[in-house]
Image: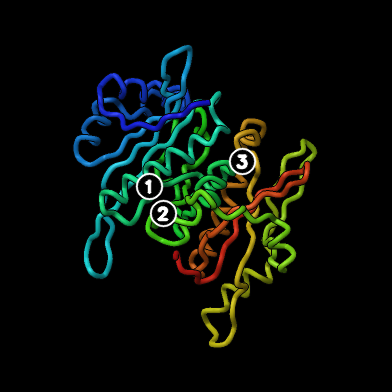
Amino acid sequence: MDINIKSLESPDEMIKVEEIQRQVWEGSETEVVPAHMLIAAVQHGGILLGAFVDDISQEKCVGFVFGFPGMYFTPDGPRPMHCSHMLAVLPEYRDLGLGFRLKRAQWQMVRHQGLDRIVWTYDPLMSRNAFLNITKLGAVCNTYLRNIYGEMRDEINKGLMSDRFQVDWWVNTNRVNHRLSRRARRPLGLNHFLDAGIQIINPSCNNPQGFPCPTQVLSTIIDHIKNVTDTTNAQPPAMLLVEVPSDFSLLKKADLQLAIEWREVTRQIFEALFKADYLVTDFVQSSSSNSRSYYVLSYGLSTL
């Protein structure tokens, strides 16, 4: 399938983006970023890119990525960055690599603007998004935001607190350049980490319906992490694995209370690990029929 990535600027194109939002985030018109806001952002340094495919002899917009300029603060004062706010692909066109291609085009345009950092948020329990953001794009994360958007009313998010990872995409680093190159490294598998002795600190077990249930974190590791700042010689594990559901959307539809439990348990885990100077650096999935998904967290690792 021929795929073209194009900048979107006209009012007609913005209306198409509105419609994609309605199809992807069903159930609440209030969650849609309107065309007039998209136009204003694009006219003042924002980036809106669309993914087009051939559909009965004409091009059809089937996905987009949207972001705008922002600021972050350092000891030397404020610095500019790009805030990537939305990425969406119509359901029938997923698994074609469109999300990756849209983000890669965004990366190229942000570099041309002279910026070195892109930030965005996503639900850490959504494995599909984690694989794209962390594994394929090379973003990293050490920021957990509790209920950052308040109550959300669309079908994907309603019923859960809007906890999010805020990821950093350092666009000029070797890490990101290697992930986006035409000869990108092959993703590591779960077996690579297990063979190296990396521990899963919250291994799940299945309930009678076949869904994974959150379990108590390995207390010895958590106690060691909590105590390490009070000692001079102790070192926490260099890497840890944190399990999340492989299909959180399906789990949430089947059992909302179980989804809430996963939110509460993983919130505690990630907040504790980020406070202890861990950084999300990879995401892996098991290849067995009983699929499992895991974040890889590294202690004190540079974003480079």
Query: Which residue lies at the image location 53% right of the left edge and 36% below the top edge?
Result: 97
Expressed as whole percent of the image width and height from the top left, the position of residue 289 reads 78, 41
- Which residue is labeled 3 in the image? 259
- How much space separates mark 3 and mark 2, taking CA atoms? 28 Å
Name the quarter where the C terminus is drawn: bottom left
Instruction: From the image, tell me which residue sits under label 1.
Output: 107
| Viewer-nearest of discs 1 and 2 | 1
Q: Residue at x 76, y 49 (%)?
A: 205
Quick one: label 1 or label 2, which is nearer the N terminus? 1
Task: Please state which of the two labelled residues, at mark 3 or mark 2, is closer to the viewer.
Answer: 2
Residue contact between numbered discs 1 and 2, judged by CB atoms under 8 Å: yes
Badge 3 or badge 2: first in the primary sequence: 2
The number of numbered badges drawn on the structure is 3
Rendered location of residue 14, percent (x, y):
30, 24
Q: Nearer the viewer, residue 22 or 105?
A: 105
Q: Quadrant of residue 60?
A: top left
Q: Label 2 belongs to which residue?
A: 169
Task: Report crowding for label 2: few under 14, some 14 to 19, many 20 or more residues within 10 A (C-alpha).
Answer: many
